[in-house]
Image: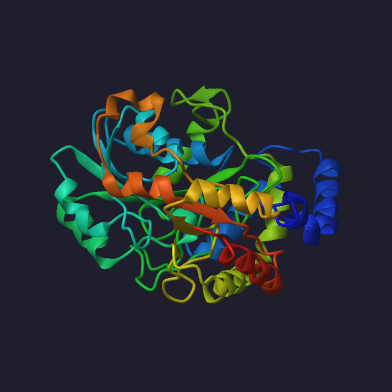
Amino acid sequence: MKYPQLSLQQANEPYMAEMKAAAAEVIEGGWYIRGKYVAQLEERLCDYLGCRYAVATGNGLDALRLMLRAYIELGVMRPGDEVIVPANTYVASVLAITDNGLVPVFVEPSVDTYNLDTSLVEQAVTPRTRAVMVVHLYGRACWDESLKTVARRHGLKIVEDNAQAFGAVSSVVGLHGSHHTGALGDASGQSFYPTKNLGALGDAGAVVTDDKELADVVRALGNYGSSVRYVNDYKGVNSRMDDLQAAFLSVKLKYLDEDNRRRAAVARTYTDSIRHERLILPQAGGEGEHIWHQYVVRCGERDRLMRYLEAEGVGTLIHYPIPPHKQRCYREYNNLHFPIAEQLAGEVLSLPMSAYLTESDAREIAAIINRFDM
């Protein structure tokens, strides 16, 4: 495959020497879980995002689960309460809700942005609604004044699934003064899975918030429910980032903005060069609003296009072919119908995207796409 959808070896090559040195420091230091490198990363995440607290977790799903569980422990939510969530998100967003005994209320995405259609949020609010989960899908910020207005009017929390958009910014300021996704709402979950724009070399995640009480509960919950050794205030879990991953992420965080700028250049080249009348290209939004975790095109002949590109040496992936409400694990929602989410699931295709791609690569891939015979 000349152009794989993503090569992690190529993506990490520029940082290899620094990461090897960081790994050696951790190994020689002798403290490997929730040590000084984790504390250092938490501080750097806060500095970058413009927030007060970050709690490193074992992975991105746990970040979302523990964030919602902490709200339950604090009495803000209770099992049976509802959380509004986009109908076209990755299943992790919904798993975090249902794992806590909360009820997902699906809302259609915008056919233009692929993010939650914020104009539909208020009509989904009921007396049991406690939160809106916004998902910054594919790397594009999902935020506007209407979300803030609805949250204030109904006393709702706004929680973010920022797994795919670390580094994106919104022109509309967040609840606590930041413009960065992950620090726009009341709390957020980050994923540092290796494929992310800021990716570890294994599983890793974090909860970010300006709420000290929430952060303290999340930290305890991820440490067997304990904030003091052998004293367990909650029925917690084991979800702690190891210092190796924290050290790797601290190295890569230094280069994130430049990497995202390179991704944006590749995205612009795709948009300028793809001239196929049957393809719908993604919208960039405002400056810095999209950090191009994925460059997702839409095509009515998606599967045939995918096979053609594979034969031409271009790797692609589908993010995501089955929306959560149609998954077997959520049979109770299988009878629901969300036409836009289901249409997108049948049409979306992610082209190669990474900071190591060049604009020349993007032009060649575009030329191959333009030769596709519909």
Q: Is residue 182 visible?
A: no
Horizontal and vertical percent position of residue 137: 44, 54
Please report the residue visible at 48 percent of the width from the left and 32 percent of the height from the top. 221
Task: Tell how many labels.
Answer: 0
Please report the residue visible at 56 percent of the width from the left and 60 percent of the height from the top. 372
Most extreme residue toward the front, as rendered?
A: 373
Horizontal and vertical percent position of residue 128: 17, 37
Task: Give the quarter of the image for residue 202.
Answer: top right
Please tell me whether residue 291 is drawn above or below residue 38 in the rendered image. below
Horizontal and vertical percent position of residue 304: 53, 48
Please report the residue visible at 82 percent of the width from the left and 56 percent of the height from the top. 16
Please tell me whether residue 151 is drawn above or below residue 67 in the rendered image. below
- In this view, the residue in front, 36 or 176, is 176
Please report the residue visible at 14 percent of the width from the left and 50 percent of the height from the top. 123
Asked if residue 36 lies left or right of residue 298, the reply is right
Task: Give the quarter of the image for residue 87.
Answer: top left
- In this view, the residue in front, 195 or 275, is 275
Task: Give the quarter of the image for residue 182.
Answer: bottom left
Horizontal and vertical percent position of residue 68: 38, 38
Q: Is residue 314 visible?
A: yes
Q: How is the image coloured?
A: rainbow
- In this view, the residue in front, 272 or 301, is 301
Please tell me whether residue 90 is drawn above or below residue 45 in the rendered image. above
